[in-house]
Image: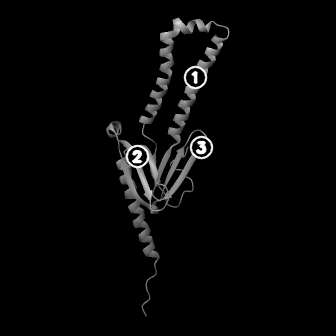
Amino acid sequence: MIHPDHLPHTQNGEKTIFFLHRHWHVVLQIFLAILLLYLIPAIILFFFWSSTIAPLTSHPFLGPLLFLVASAYICGVWLLAFVEFVDYYLDVWIVTNKRILNIEQLGLFHRTASELPLNVVQDVTSEVKGILPTLFDFGTVYIQTAGETRRFVFKEVPHPEKVKEQIIATLEQERVRVNASAKSTVPEPLHL
C-alpha cells in the first residue's frame, strides 16, 4: 500500500491533501455478507440434520463427499471475504496540491492506477444518494476534465461535500500559484 508520505513520482513542493479510502460501511457490508453466507448452511444443517444429513455422514462415499463440499464452501467464503477486503483496502484516492491519483484494485491480480494533474480539472461534483449515505455522510465525488479522459470517480468516500470543497480550494490555490509564477517569469516590456 502507498503511504501518504511516499507517493510515486513526487514533484517539488507536492503535499498530500487527502488520502481517501471508501467509507467504513463497506467493511460492515462485507462482514454482514460473509456472516449471511455462513448462517445459511448452519440453518440448513439445523433443520435437516437429523432427518437427511446425519444418515449421509455415515455413508462410506457420501460422508467424505459431504465433508469435502462443506470444506470447499467454507474455504470459498473465506476467499471471497479476503478478496473483498483487499479490494476495499487497496482502493485509494490521493489528492495533492499538484495532482490526483486514482488507484483501484480490481480483484487480486489487477490494479489500475491513474494520475490527473490539477490544472486539467474542469468540474468537481459530489453526490449523496439514499438514506444510509445521507445519515452516515458518504457518497461519490466525480472529477471531470475538459479532454476525452474519463472522469475520476471516488466511490463511497466519507464526507463527499467536504472533499469536493477541498479539491476546489486546492485547485484555485494551484491556479493562483501558477499564474503568479507565470507573471514573475514574463520579462518587462522594453521602452524605446
Amino acid type, mark 1: Tyr
Mark 1 is surrounded, within 10 Å at the Cα level, by few (under 14), some (14 to 19) or many (20 or more) other residues, namely some
Specify the quadrant of the image occupied by residue 97.
Answer: bottom left
Please say if 45 is above or below 23. above
Q: Position of residue 35 (x, y in %)?
A: 47, 24
Looking at marks 2 and 1 on the same chain, the residue that comes earlier in the sequence is marked by: 1
Tell me what residue is drawn at x 57 percent, y 39 percent. Answer: 107
Disc 1 from disc 3: Cα separation:
25 Å
2 and 1 marks in contact (CB < 8 Å): no
Q: Which mark is residue 140?
A: 2
Numbered disc 1: secondary structure: helix
Amino acid type, mark 2: Thr
Looking at marks 1 and 3 on the same chain, the residue that comes earlier in the sequence is marked by: 1
Q: Which residue is mark 3?
A: 110
Numbered disc 3: secondary structure: loop
Q: Which mark is residue 73?
A: 1
